[in-house]
Every structure is written in structure tokens, then in C-alpha cells.
Amino acid sequence: MIQGNLVVGTARGGTAGLPDATVTPGRDYNILAGAVVAYAEVDLGIVQPFVGVVFGTADGDPTDSKLHGFSPASWQDVTQITGVSWFAHLETSTNFAGRDYSCPARLQGLQGPGPTRAPLNVGPVIFSGGSPFECSHTVTNPFNQRISVGSPLGLGTVYSNPGTLLIPVGLKAYPVKGHELVGWYVYRGMVNTNLLEVAFAPELAGKGIGKAQIHEFGGYYQWYLNPYFDIRLAGSLAFLGSGFKDIARLADCNLQTPGVQACDGNNLALKGEVRFRARF
């Protein structure tokens, strides 16, 4: 399966987003962004290896009047790639398009090391997720459309984001009738981190931000007892990539201690699930 996506249009600045003293009312922004979704699977009998790619273009310059970060117009527009038709075996995977892993060191209002000591998630809006489950992307949406939403002056838009590169690879196995085993690795990364480096320039002091966000390993075993009942055991572990570790280090993880105690971003995210399902 291969699917191309193209978004074109115009947005008007100064009428939406956060108030900003530097807003130029009526500034026009040209939207031109694209994406590719691809998936391949080989049926070798008992085993079926698979690989997929989700790519969305990035907006590399938050100061110009061009918006190149791809995002679907609404969550309904991505159901064809996150639904049962192609990626159903990855629905267990939080990293792919389910509930997002929490933004590193920001959801508790942890303060940054700059002179203002402001939390990393306040204006301009860099990470716009209003809930702890939407940091990089909205639930069911695999694209990183929630990063740098407020970076263009005078405009709140999902079309200013660092782009998306999502690669799932894994193996399905059917050793015995009624039994299914699936294992996977998922890489989530950004395409261009320039707008994050501009947003955090004082804190970074000339350093860059890596592109890797999350590495995830997971799998499940499913037993189909009959056409109406099945049992599934699933689990996954994920750890931050270089980019999210760089962002985590900007936050103060211990506000009770004088000075800045930078977060390290080394904790694993662990998930386990036992599901009993009946269908009638």
C-alpha cells in the first residue's frame, strides 16, 4: 500500500493563536505540505514480515510566511491508515498512533533553565497537547502536528511542525491455528528540528536538538478460542531518542533544590495489557 497526501492553502495571521506583541495583523501564510504513507507485508506461510513508513514534511523556518509542516485537516482524515485495514496489529503500540508518551519533563510544569524559569509548555506554545496523552500528536493521528503549533508570529496552526518520520518493522507469526504472535520495533522521529532550536535558543546556547523522539519495542500473543471470544497478552517498552533527551535536559526536574537539576530522559516507559474480548 502506498498513499500520497498534499495540503495547500492560505492562513491569515493575527486572528488566531496566542496574543503576541509582535503580531502583524493580516499577514498571509502560504501552506504547502505533503506526506507519504506506505506499508508492505510478505506472506511466507507461518510468518509474515512487515515494514511501514509514515513521512510528513517539516516546517524548517518559523519566522517566514510559509508553512510546510504536514498535518491532516482532521482526525477523520487519518483513519484510513490507523484503522483495521493496514495497521491494526500496531494499535497496541502507543508510539504509532494511540495515546502518546508524555512529553519529556514538561507535563508537570517543570521549569526551564532560562532567566524566566518558565515551564517549557507555555507561550509561545511549543508542545500544545492539552492532555498528558497528546504531546507530539493527537490520538489516532501519527503525524507530529502538536509540536510548535504557536511558533509562527500571530498564528496558531498545526502546519508549523518539525515533520514526521515513523517506521514500524516487525513480524507476524501463526504457529498453530487460532494463535497469533506479533512483534515490532517502531521508530518515531522529526524531520527538521530548526524551529525547536529557534524556540529554545537561549537555553540551548548554540547546541542542537537531535531528530529521534522515541524507540519502542513491543508485541502481543492472541488466542482465538472461537469466533466469538479471544484473549490477548500485550506489552511494550519505549525509551527516548536523542531529540527528546535534548529537550528533557532543558527542564529542571527538582524544583525543591536550588539551581537547575536537569532531567536525563533515561526512564523507560513500560506498558502491559491483558484483554478478554467477546464479540456477538
Image (cartoon, rainbow, N blue to C red):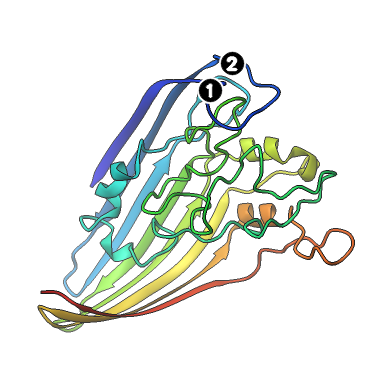
- Residue 177, position as x, y percentages in the image: 13, 82
Q: Above or below — where is 157 with respect to 39?
A: above
Left/right placement of residue 157 relative to residue 86 reads: right
Q: Residue at x 34, y 30 (%)?
A: 6
- Residue 187, position as x, y percentages in the image: 47, 57
Q: Is the C-beta separation of discs 2 and 1 under 8 Å?
A: yes
Mark 2 residue type: Pro
Q: Which residue is mark 2?
A: 25
Left/right placement of residue 202 relative to residue 91 reads: right
User: SS for tag 2?
Assistant: loop
User: SS for tag 1?
Assistant: loop
- Residue 89, position as x, y percentages in the image: 28, 65
Q: Between residues 130 and 186, which one lies in front from this camera angle?
A: 130
Mark 1 residue type: Thr
Q: Residues within 10 Å of mark 1 (few under 14, many from 20)?
A: some
Tell me where residue 175 sits by quadrant.
Answer: bottom left
Q: Residue at x 48, y 65 (%)?
A: 216
Q: Between residues 54 and 143, which one lies in front from this camera angle?
A: 143
Left/right placement of residue 162 relative to residue 40 reads: right
Q: Residue at x 41, y 38 (%)?
A: 71
Reading the chain from its start, which is encountered first: label 2 or label 1?
1
Q: How many marks?
A: 2
Which label was assigned to residue 15? 1
The CA span between labels 2 and 1 is 7 Å
Q: Residues within 10 Å of mark 2 (few under 14, many from 20)?
A: some
- Residue 142, position as x, y percentages in the image: 40, 50
Q: Residue at x 64, y 29 (%)?
A: 19
Which label was assigned to residue 86? none
